[in-house]
Amino acid sequence: MSEYLVVTGLSGAGRSTTAATLEDLGWFVIDNMPSALISKVSELVDGTGSEMERVAFVVGRGGGDVDDVLPAVDALAAGRSRVRILFLDAPDDVLVRRFEGTRRRHPQAARGVVDSIADERRLLGPLRDRADLVIDTGDLNVNQLRTRLIEVFGAEEHAGAMQASFVSFGFKYGVPLDVDLLFDCRFLPNPYWDEALRHLSGLEPEVREYVLDRPETRRFLDMLDELLAMLLPAYAKEGKSYLTVAMGCTGGRHRSVVLAEELARRLDAHGLAATVFHRDVDR
């Protein structure tokens, strides 16, 4: 049975980049797909002789026929296909800047860009509520979004299992909006105040040793490990496809990076799919 992904979200939030990235990863992508045709296309994909295993429908441009998307998703799922919804979001001010920078006309075509974004956000609200994964692209450039998508959709060895993603970030750059769980690492000793470590990141062994070689760090990680061991099976039982866990420190370069890497390593040791994305490590 084929695997389906419905890609939707606000105009300007990165649907074109997402479509191109999925194509590079081997997905069969149909852009600007009329929702009413999803079931027809799925019949061809699931038909005898079809070699398409992963199909992505990019829908919801400017609102359009979004009312038909959820019934189409439910129909696919009823046929025992694996169907997921990816929603791309971004803050209003970021979307406004993107439209002003490209001078493109917003597809919703209301009184102005701000009103158009508000209308589209309202129309797409039910899809966002049902999304398996929401990616906030407000703080991501094109390359960072591509990296995030590759981490989530590039691996095939865990297909069918719930995927966990650990995101490190800096509170000084804002809290990510597209996460399920968030933990504050700022209570841990900060390598930034060691001049020999300040210019390094949490990906360097010296910083990793500094952070992990603390009793409070080890206890914190053990408690998180125990918490996730309880939560992950419960989330999977409820049908959740993705779990995004954010680890935050002041600048997003040291403590949060180390802890995100370590938690992903621990989950991998338990045989669970885990990816890592460092949002602010290069700032």
Image (cartoon, rainbow, N blue to C red):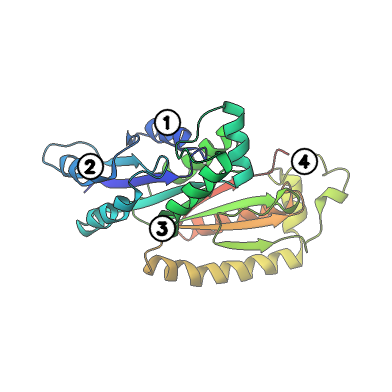
Query: Who's the residue at 47% across and 37% down the image?
Result: 109
Q: Which residue is mark 1?
A: 20
Q: Check residue 37 in the rendering and tell me which mark sits there, or answer none.
A: 2
- Which part of the image, by quadrant, shows the C terminus? top right
Pick the front one: 218 or 249: 249
Disc 2 vs disc 4: which is toward the camera? 2
As measured in the structure, the alpha-carbon distance from the residue carrying label 2 to the one carrying label 4 is 51 Å
Instruction: Give the class, few, some or many, for how many residues have Cα within 10 Å of label 3's Cα (few <14, many ≥20).
Output: some
Is residue 272 left or right of 216 when viewed as pictured?
A: left
**Residue at the farthest front position:** 111
Q: Which residue is mark 4?
A: 200
Amino acid type indicated by mark 2: Leu
As measured in the structure, the alpha-carbon distance from the residue carrying label 4 to the one carrying label 1 is 33 Å
As measured in the structure, the alpha-carbon distance from the residue carrying label 4 to the one carrying label 3 is 43 Å
Amino acid type indicated by mark 1: Ala
Q: Evaluate if marks 3 and 1 touch, with contact meaning CB atoms under 8 Å apart.
A: no
Asked if 29 appears above or below 72 in the picture, the reply is above
Query: Who's the residue at 56% across and 57% down the image?
Result: 179
Q: Earlier in the sequence, mark 2 or mark 4?
A: 2
Instruction: Give the class, few, some or many, for how many residues have Cα within 10 Å of label 4's Cα (few <14, many ≥20).
Output: some
Amino acid type indicated by mark 3: Pro
Query: Who's the residue at 35% across and 36% down the image?
Result: 32
Q: Secondary structure at mark 3?
A: helix
